[in-house]
Amino acid sequence: MRKNILFMTVLCALLVLFNGCDSFVKTIEETKSGATRNENITSGEKSNALKAESQNEHSAPIDTPNHGFLMDTSALLRAEEALRNRPELRGKEIFIYMSIQFYDDYRIYLKIQNPDNPKYVDSYHYDKGRWSDSKPVILSKRDIVSKNIVNINELPFKNAHRVSRIIQDKLIEIESKSKDYNVYAITSNNKIRWYPRSLTSDRSRYTIEFNADGSLKSFDQD
């Protein structure tokens, strides 16, 4: 009788242990997944142009020229319209602050000058066809918001499609195998600068530059 009780006790303990391990592993995997997501968000918040270009390695690969957010002009227009129609932005001028990042898996990260208080900045995240609620951005006393903004009318989302289309054509032209990139726009000093600024093939590296409207300005081999 005592042996049976002891056996059942040990068996119950083992079951609890195994179930606990499974839960622990699941928690790790969920945390890892969430951490990866947060890394993307953090990288999306970076406004430095050099850092923005280096983040291209985190982009979702584009399988074909006709698929993905950057090739979907209708989806880009819907995303912009949805942003303009948010209650706190509807009918107001919208100024993009420092950067906007477009990801081919239908995500956008951007920061906007607060329309009610020009000294403030809010961040927004677009995912699964919806914009997140705004989140306040912490600024330092050295940040001069007015010097790093561009009106959204000068940076319509459809221009990201133009940049992406040119990049894909140039990758084919230089016989590059790379499809791993994102499209960024930096608004530092009230000027629009599109990224990436370089493309590579197996044997060469090229510098690419865009006009403010996303059209090609120059493309040269280094």
Image (tube, helix red, strand yellow):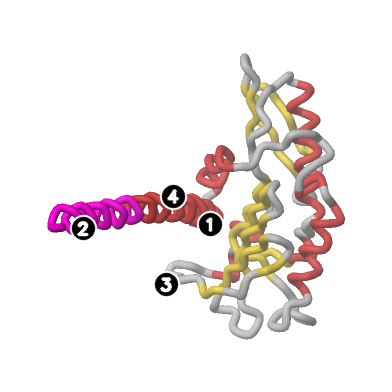
Magenta segment: 1-20
Viewer-closest of 181 and 27 = 27
Is residue 83 positioned above or below 207 on the image? below
- The answer to whether the residues at label 3 and label 2 have Cβ atoms under 8 Å apart is no
Q: What kind of element bears circle 3?
A: loop
What amino acid is labelled 2 in the image? Thr
Rounded to the nearest whole Å, what is the CA distance between mark 1 and mark 3?
24 Å
CA gap, disc 4 and disc 2:
30 Å
Question: Which numbered disc, 1 or 2, marks the residue that appears first in the sequence?
Answer: 2
How many marks overall?
A: 4
Report the Cα–Cα distance between label 1 and label 2: 48 Å
User: Can residue 80 be seen here?
Assistant: yes
Residue located 69% across and 64% down the image? 150
Label 3 sits on what residue type?
Lys
Q: Which residue is mark 2?
A: 9
Q: Give residue 11's position: percent from left, percent from top.
A: 26, 52
Residue depicted at 68% across the width and 68% down the height: 131
